[in-house]
Structures are given as C-alpha cells and as structure tokens.
C-alpha cells in the first residue's frame, strides 16, 4: 500500500459523522492516508479487517478478469465508506482515482460486527444490485444516463456534476468501450441534455430527460 500519512491534519472525528455505526473506536483518531492518482489502497487477496472512509477524492473498486481486462464494480466518493467484506479477505482491488485521502476505521474491541455493520452491508448489496441492472441494459445511452443520474444524486442533486474518473473508467464500470462512452457523451450534449464543462465536469441541462433515459 503506497500512501502519504499525515497525522497532524485536524479533521472531524469519524465517530461524529452521520451514517457510521458506533462500532468504530473513536480513540485514538486514525491518521489520514493520502494516495496519489492510481495508487493502490489494498489488493485482491490481502487480509481484510477494517473499513475505509473517503475524506476527499474518489476510489475505484475493481477486479482483473482472466483475459486481463478490468471490471470496475464501484466508485466511492467523499464521505462514503468501502472495504466491507463477508470474510477476512479482500476480493477486489481498491485504487485512488485521483488525489485521495482515506481514513481507516477500525473496530472497537469486542464489537458485534454482525449487528452494527448490517446497514453498511445492505447498502453495498443494494448498490451492487443497481449496478447489475444497469449492466443488463442493451442501450449504451441508457447505461451512461443512469450512471450520470446516480453520480448527481450522490453529489446532492446538483446540476453540475463532477466526474473524477476517466472515460475509460466509466467504460470499465458500464461494460462499454471508451469510444462508446465518448460518443454517448457527445450525443447527449448535441441533444441538449447535458453540457460538457470540461473533461471532468458536466452540467445536467434536462434533468427529467436524463432520468427517463436512465430508467
């Protein structure tokens, strides 16, 4: 794991952050680990035993297929938690998409994992099921539209959506080629559904149209 550690940064304690069960030990406060773009946070096959919360930046979760292709199963943004496993081993790779800060959340001694971590497990299961529904769609426009709607909702429903991941990342997440993803973005722009602010940011111009395409 390649990271820069900074224990002197003053960030809010994760024990006070909403959405996290009190199963996590608030003291001592774990330092924040900084990962440059492309740095590995943990690898498939490594021992699990902690959860991770994104302080800023973004994380991609992926697995390498037998033919060498990469399948991204999830993206995690600031404030989101990842690393939950059903057993003691990581089954995917976790990697920083861009400059990212992550805090390790370690369990309190004697904590009842099966009960307190259930909400996190169910949330992860729901996201995985929604991802499968997106992958099951035949139309590339529907897949990209559903992805953009999801990203907007996870960023507070703002019209301007930040996309820290590359077009290749989006393709590996949606089961599309980078060329197809780029064509769909251009088509949505030409139809006036979105506006391409820059490579990593879009504005949703017609929210209802985008939602309809993604349903």
Image: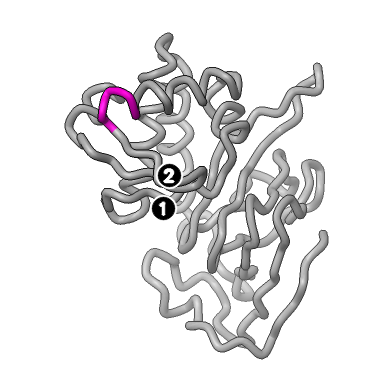
- Residue in view at x 53 percent, y 18 percent: 180
Q: Residues within 10 Å of mark 2 (few under 14, many from 20)?
A: few
Single out the residue that lies furthest toward the left.
208
Give the distance between the C-alpha atoms of the residues marked 1 and 2, in whole angstroms.
Answer: 5 Å
- Tag 1–tag 2 contact (CB < 8 Å): yes
Q: Position of residue 116 (x, y in %)?
A: 46, 61
Q: Residues within 10 Å of mark 1 (few under 14, many from 20)?
A: some
30 or 148: nearer the viewer: 148
Residue that mark 2 sits on: 122
Q: Secondary structure at mark 1?
A: helix
214 or 21: nearer the viewer: 214
Tell me if 161 is positioned left or right of 176 in this view: left
Residue that mark 1 sits on: 119
211 or 87: nearer the viewer: 211
* Quarter of the rendering occupied by the C terminus: top left
Q: Position of residue 31 (x, y in %)?
A: 67, 80
| Magenta span: chief secondary structure | loop
Tell me if 183 is positioned left or right of 175 in this view: left
- Residue in view at x 64 percent, y 68 percent: 104
Residue 71, above or below 82: above
Q: Quadrant location of residue 202?
A: top left
Residue 172, above or below 177: below
| Magenta span contains residue 162 | no
- Highlighted magenta segment, given as a residue range: 189-193
Residue 120, above or below 199: below
């Amino acid at each position: 794991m390649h990271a820069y550690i900074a224990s002197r940064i003053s960030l809010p304690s994760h024990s006070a952050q909403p959405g996290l069960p009190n199963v996590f030990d608030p003291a001592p406060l774990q330092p924040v680990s900084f990962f440059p773009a492309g740095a590995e946070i943990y690898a498939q096959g490594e021992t699990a035993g902690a959860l991770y919360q994104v302080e800023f930046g973004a994380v991609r979760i992926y697995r390498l297929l037998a033919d060498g292709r990469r399948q991204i199963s999830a993206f995690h943004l600031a404030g989101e938690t990842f690393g939950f496993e059903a057993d003691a081993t990581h089954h995917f790779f976790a990697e920083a998409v861009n400059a990212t800060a992550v805090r390790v959340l370690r369990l309190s001694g004697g904590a009842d994992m099966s009960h307190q971590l259930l909400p996190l497990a169910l949330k992860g299961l729901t996201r995985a099921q929604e991802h499968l529904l997106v992958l099951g769609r035949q139309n590339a426009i529907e897949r990209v539209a559903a992805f953009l709607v999801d990203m907007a909702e996870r960023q507070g429903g703002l019209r301007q959506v930040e996309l820290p991941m590359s077009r290749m990342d989006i393709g590996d997440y949606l089961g599309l080629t980078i060329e197809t993803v780029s064509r769909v973005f251009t088509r949505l722009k030409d139809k006036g559904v979105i506006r391409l602010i820059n490579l990593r940011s879009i504005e949703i111009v017609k929210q209802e149209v985008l939602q309809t395409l993604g349903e």
